Amino acid sequence: MTPPPEIRNICCIGAGYVGGPTMAVIADRCPQIQINVVDLNESRIAAWNEKDLSKLPVYEPGLDEVVARARGRNLYFSTEVNAAISTADMIFISVNTPTKTKGLGSGQASDLRWVEACARQVALHAQGHTIVVEKSTLPVRTAETIQAILQAAQQPSTNKPQRSFVVLSNPEFLAEGTAISDLESPDRVLIGGEDDEAINALASIYNQWVPTKKILRTNLWSSELSKLTANAFLAQRISSINSIAAICEVTGGDVREVSMAIGADSRIGKKFLNSGPGFGGSCFKKDILNLVYLCKHFGLPEVADYWQNVVTLNTWQQTRIAQLIVKRLFGTVTGKRLAIFGFAFKADTNDTREAPAINIALELLEEGAQLAIYDPQVKSNQIEIDLQLPATSCPDIKAGQTRAALNGEGTWWISNSVEEAATGSDAILILTEWDAFKNLNWNNIAPKMRQPAWVFDTRSVVNPQEVRSTGLKLWRVGDGAS
Ligand code: UDX
Ligand code: ADP
């Protein structure tokens, strides 16, 4: 076997939740490779270059230490996209690919304008032989688009030296909140492509810390499809267990017990069986909708409907929770103060993309609720964007109902602690499973609330006896006894 071409210089386009942590770990493990992470977003790059590591744009446990070791040594963050492309032997495309909101495939297909723009930039500025790696989650056959653009650039021209390109697919399977440990010891690394030399070059980078048997090789299309399929299967487990939670609630079952019982079957396995407020995050919904679009395009409507239902059930779970909250609060939340504990789509991240908290909060705001939101990592300006509603300041509880509350207008504000959010509230809604919510002092919190007061635990984090012993009423997801 010919040794793979040595990769000395990597450029990663896109410094987001995938590009930033992934390149930080590669730089940490491969000090001989210079890595330039570039992004058009100046404030994001400035945040990656922050001296104070608590201000990095992505919150991930362990990320600060990895960045501290590699940044300035062989890891650089900059907005100089073209310069970084021109010096790279290998370019990772790690840009955003949200679901299209208008035009052909609206609501289902991915918007590939950023990927296409990247491919064109690479076509213009790359030099010599360049391996282009798809890292973003992409619809199947996107590599074809990238290849077509790069092939056009490969044509010999009189005024440019000859260039050549190879496109590989290398989907990222990291989960937010555990990104660093997922990257440091992945279950597998998947490389799709047709060019053995390029595949070997990429494999030899991962091989610095990942055992060879965990580096899987497939063709390009299998690799792209595996990413969508993995996310669809994981999301399907969550919708399945959430559907069973609803049955538990009406039959007297307990979904935690059902999860434990079925998870003990080694064919099923115990992971991803936690019932909750529905899945969020930037990948699951987008990838399933991509799959649905692909199935429709290729004349497989039954398969499309099958996967569509995973998303439909997820949205239903969020609406169901918002509605049962209203019902238990005597059928109305208008003017009532509700405390929301957790806004991120899962614990240990500051990411709110597709967070269940968004839909649940919007439904309650529509009903005229006054929401006191507390999250250990999510900032007020992000919630403003998500709810498309500016925050108000925290009303003085002693001054009685605000004008907005009397008019039935939903409002929200940010709280700086669980105690502050709970004060004067009729209910606490736990929407993210932050560790900090697992050991709350309910004896301290209960007297601060307006009685009769409720706790709605959508993440199964509280100890039911402890909560009930303070006189609070408790609803837990999938608990037929509450
Ligand atoms: C997911 C995939 O796990 C990862 O492999 C892929 O690269 C990107 O998409 P991520 O979205 O970051 O990762 O987080 P994940 O841990 O998968 O959680 C997704 C959502 O499912 C979260 O909202 C989480 O709260 C929810 N979830 C997860 C449950 O409701 N129950 C579970 O048992 C597990
Ligand atoms: P992900 O979760 O997939 O990492 P993000 O939205 O967090 O997605 O990050 C994608 C990043 O890609 C954004 O910071 C965005 O500014 C950047 N980006 C998009 N298009 C380009 C481009 N053509 N050149 C450089 N950066 C880009």
Image (cartoon, rainbow, N blue to C red):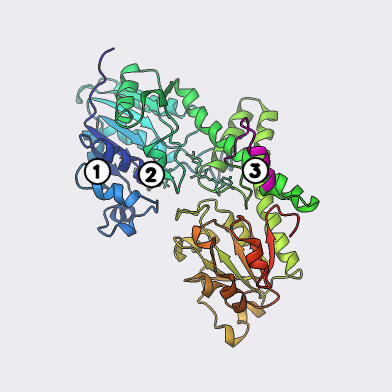
**The residue carrying mark 3 has its beta carbon less than 8 Å from ligand 1:** no
Amino acid bearing label 3: Met
- Quarter of the image for residue 57 reads bottom left
Q: Looking at the picture, tell me which residue is in the foreground, 237 or 361.
A: 237
The reply to whether the magenta stretch includes residue 233 is: no
Q: CA distance from mark 2 to mark 1?
A: 16 Å
Residue 198 visible in the picture: yes
Counting from the top left corner in percent of width and height, residue 46 is at 28, 55
Q: CA distance from mark 1 to mark 3?
A: 43 Å
Counting from the top left corner in percent of width and height, residue 30 is at 25, 35
Give the extent of the magenta segment: 257-271
Q: CA distance from mark 2 to mark 3?
A: 28 Å
The answer to whether residue 82 is above or below residue 338 is above
The residue shown at (61%, 47%) is: 274
Hey, which residue is sitting farthest top in the picture? 1
Amino acid bearing label 1: Leu
Mark 2 or mark 3: name the one nearer the start of the chain: 2
Quadrant (top left/top right/bottom left/bottom right) for the N terminus: top left
Residue 364 visible in the picture: no
Counting from the top left corner in percent of width and height, residue 102 is at 55, 44
Mark 1 or mark 3: name the one nearer the start of the chain: 1
Q: Is residue 181 left or right of residue 422?
A: left
Hey, which residue is sitting farthest bottom in the picture? 399
Which label belongs to residue 180?
A: 2
Q: Which residue is mark 1?
A: 75
Helix, strand or loop at label 2? It is: helix
Q: Nearer the viewer, mark 2 or mark 1?
A: 2
Q: Which residue is mark 3?
A: 260
- Quarter of the image for residue 453 reads bottom right
